[in-house]
Image (cartoon, rainbow, N blue to C red):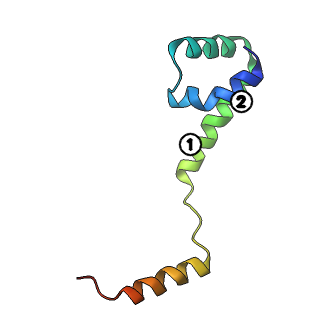
Amino acid sequence: MRCQDFTAHATELMEGALDWRQRLAMRLHLAICDACRGFLRQMRDAVSLVGIVPPPPPPPEVEAEVLRRLSDAGPAP
C-alpha cells in the first residue's frame, strides 16, 4: 500500500467502513509508515476538536429570514 492509498481511505478506516482485508492492509501500512501514523493522529485530533467547537451562528440575513417566516406563519395550532 502506498501513502496515497492510505490517505484516500483513512476516513473509512476511522469510520469502520472497510472490510477486514482493507483494514489489515491499512494496519500493516501504519506499522511501517511514520508519516501515515502522524496523518491518522492529526485526523483523529481534528475530529475530536470539531466535536467541541460550537458551530458558527447563522449570518444575520438568515436569522432575519427565519424570524420573518415564523412571524408570517402565525401562532401554532
At horizontal 51% and vertical 27% (from top left) the residue drawn is: 17
Secondary structure under tag 2 reads: helix
Q: Which residue is mark 2?
A: 39
* Residue 26 to residue 71: above or below: above
The picture places residue 55, in percent across and down from the top left corner, at 56, 61
The residue furthest front is: 73
At horizontal 58% and vertical 72% (from top left) the residue drawn is: 58
**Residue 8 in which image quadrant:** top right
* Residue 11 to residue 19: above or below: below
- CA gap, disc 2 to disc 1? 14 Å
Looking at the image, residue 24 sits to the left or right of residue 72; the answer is right
| Front residue of 26 and 30 | 26
At horizontal 69% and vertical 22% (from top left) the residue drawn is: 6
| Front residue of 1 and 54 | 1
* Residue 37 to residue 46: above or below: above
**Residue 46 in which image quadrant:** top right
- Disc 1 residue type (three-letter): Ser
Looking at the image, residue 74 sits to the left or right of residue 68; the answer is left
User: How many marks overall?
Assistant: 2
* Residue 39 to residue 46: above or below: above
Q: Which residue is mark 1?
A: 48
Secondary structure under tag 1 reads: helix
The picture places residue 13, in percent across and down from the top left corner, at 57, 26
Q: If you read the primary sequence from the N terminus, does the residue marked by circle 2 or circle 1 appear first?
A: 2
- Disc 2 residue type (three-letter): Phe
